Image (cartoon, helix red, strand yellow):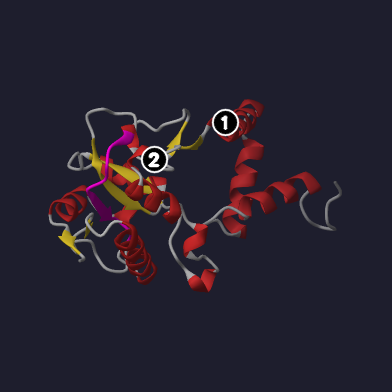
Amino acid sequence: MRSRLGGYPGAVEDLIDRIARLPGIGPRSAERLALHLLREPPGTAEGLAAALRAIKRAVRNCAVCYNLTEGALCAVCGDDRRDRAVVLAVEQPRDVLALEQTGVYTGVYHVLLGRVAPLEGVGPGDLTIAALVGRVRDPALNCAGVAVREVVLGTSPTLEGDGTALVLAEAVGRVAPGVRVTRLARGLPTGSALELASKAVLADAITERRDLR
């Protein structure tokens, strides 16, 4: 690969470009990271490359809740001590980690892998909403075949999160009107992301959740 006139060698330019494609990393940050890796011993870059290959090969979505796992089921879905009749729907796997750190929630999860965002071209069909509805409608699709009695909506308190919660509530209501649908209490700051909330705020939100219908 050839470098641009007066620029970095082609291999460095390619690395900068690839790093810059990652979310939250701009061209300047990508450049700093690439140059840092270039200064590190060869083993650092090789270890990073090996870790990237390993996660692509070994990590997958849980067959039930779509959380990240290295087996068929994630640690939560496979835990017999959890209340599998209560399913908390969140946007991303990182939200599961944030809620688990509170030590308050004892049910299971469903990871949507995003939120409804029409301006970004993300609709309900792009999320795992159909799989959640399937778990509610058919106990055989839920953890250990347990029937769902409550769905907790744990989307972030943003415009897109509120819209996603409304879609979920309507979808669950259509197939299982007898299933309780609640949402995390508004102790969560509006306009913020779930992963940024403190443990205390998350704990209060779980404890004070309320019915939507």
Q: Is residue 209 left or right of residue 135?
A: left
Where residue 166 appears, as percent x and y from the top left, is 33, 68
Q: Amino acid at mark 2?
A: Leu
Q: Is residue 27 above or below residue 33?
A: below
Residue 76, visible in the rendered structure: no
Nearest the eye: 93 or 53? 93
Q: Residues within 10 Å of mark 2 (few under 14, many from 20)?
A: some
Q: Which residue is mark 2?
A: 141
Determine if the magenta segment contains residue 152.
yes
Q: Residue at x 42, y 55 (%)?
A: 129
Residue 35 falls in image quadrant: top right
Question: Range of the magenta residues?
Answer: 145-156
- Mark 2 or mark 1: name the one nearer the start of the chain: 1
Residue 34, visible in the rendered structure: yes
Could you tell me how far apart the alpha carbons at marks 2 and 1 are, in whole angstroms? 32 Å
Nearest the eye: 41 or 48? 48
Q: Is residue 123 above or below residue 204?
A: below
Q: Amino acid at mark 1?
A: Ala
Residue 140 falls in image quadrant: top left
Q: Residue at x 28, y 37 (%)?
A: 146
What number is the disc on residue 51? Answer: 1
What number is the disc on residue 188? Answer: none
